Amino acid sequence: MQKLRQKHPEILFSISCTTRDPRPGDQEGVTYYFLTKEEFEKGIEESAFLEWALVHDRYYGTPLKFIEEAFRNGSSVIMDIDVQGAKIIQEKMPDRIVTIFILPPNEKEWERRLRGRGTDSEESILKRIKNGKTELARQDEFDFKIVNDDLEKSLLELEKIVFSGGKS
């Protein structure tokens, strides 16, 4: 996604809101909007999110206002969301979105990448692996799948899907 955004800045990126703590390198309003649990729950009550979910014991959500404005302006938007969020958006906007499941090449590499970030505790990594296996089981619910085993090849596949409007 980062490579796609660098190569195609005309595609807007939906910055999610979260209640998780910032990791090293995170920037407010760039990687996430960091909210308190109370702020997030107020947003839920006010229907401020297109979708939201409790993931890894933290809230994550897509700000509805950004998506509505982007679509009103005729812009394309890319989102980095989990399977719960994708399912909700598929139900709310079936004719407006294309879903793509990005897979790791294998479980060993996936775990290596998680550990390689150096930002999560062992408990958090184990929880992510457990939850990730549940998400992997739902990959067939998506319109497309890309195995991220070669970054340049994966980027080309992603561009093909994005610029064909999701038509194969």
Image (spheres, rainbow, N blue to C red):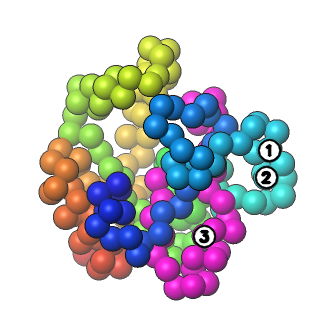
**Residue underneath mark 2:** 43
In space, the residues marked 3 and 1 are separated at their CA atoms by 20 Å
Is residue 21 located in the magenta-colored stretch of the structure? no
Q: Residues within 10 Å of mark 3 (few under 14, many from 20)?
A: many
Residues at marks 3 and 1 touching, judged by CB atoms closer than 8 Å: no
Q: Position of residue 130 (x, y in %)?
A: 44, 25
Helix, strand, or loop for circle 1? helix
Tell me which label, 3 or 1, sits earlier in the chain.
1
Tell me which label, 3 or 2, sits earlier in the chain.
2
Residues at marks 3 and 2 touching, judged by CB atoms closer than 8 Å: no
Which of the labelled discs sits on residue 39, or is there none? 1
Q: Position of residue 70 (x, y in %)?
A: 57, 76
Residue closest to the eye, 17 or 138: 17
In space, the residues marked 1 and 2 are separated at their CA atoms by 6 Å
Which of the labelled discs sits on residue 67, or is there none? 3
Q: Position of residue 143 (x, y in %)?
A: 37, 64
Give the magenta part as a residue range.
54-80
Q: Quarter-wise, where is residue 164 in the image?
A: bottom left
Q: Residue at x 62, y 34 (%)?
A: 20
Helix, strand, or loop for circle 3? helix
In space, the residues marked 3 and 2 are separated at their CA atoms by 15 Å
Q: Amino acid at mark 2?
A: Gly
Q: Residue at x 47, y 69 (%)?
A: 12
